[in-house]
Image: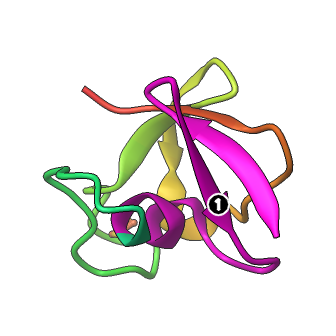
Amino acid sequence: MLKLRHNGREIEATERTTVAAAVLGAGARIAGPLCAMGVCMGCRMTIDGRAHQLACQTLCREGMEVETP
Ligand code: FES
């Protein structure tokens, strides 16, 4: 199990889980992922300080910091 943070709150995810799935699975209310295949751009998040990353195309890593508006 991996631990990461979403807007400062610790969440957990299994290996090979995308950031979008982890954030949604943790119950976050975000306007977001629509296609889950890198097309719609609806899942853009700030990941480890890098803005506009596609969360549906990014796998979770231990200690990752994720921010959404
Ligand atoms: S959900 Fe569409 S690009 Fe990520």
Q: Which residue is mark 1?
A: 12
Q: Is residue 10 magenta-colored?
A: yes
In depth, the one of 29 and 59 nearer the eye is 29
- For the point 43% across and 27% down, the residue is 7
Asked if residue 54 lies left or right of residue 60, the reply is: left
Asked if the magenta segment contains residue 6, the reply would be yes
As shown in the figure, which amino acid type bears the numbered disc 1?
Glu
Left or right of 54, for residue 47 = right
Q: Is residue 34 left or right of residue 65?
A: left
Neighbour class for label 1 at 10 Å: few (<14), some, many (≥20)? some
Extent of the magenta region: 1-24
Image quarter in which the N terminus is found: bottom right
* Residue at (34, 32) in percent of width and height: 68
The front one of 69 and 4 is 4
Residue 27 pos. (x, y %): 29, 62
Outermost residue to the top: 49
At mark 1, the secondary structure is strand
- Name the quadrant containing residue 47: top right
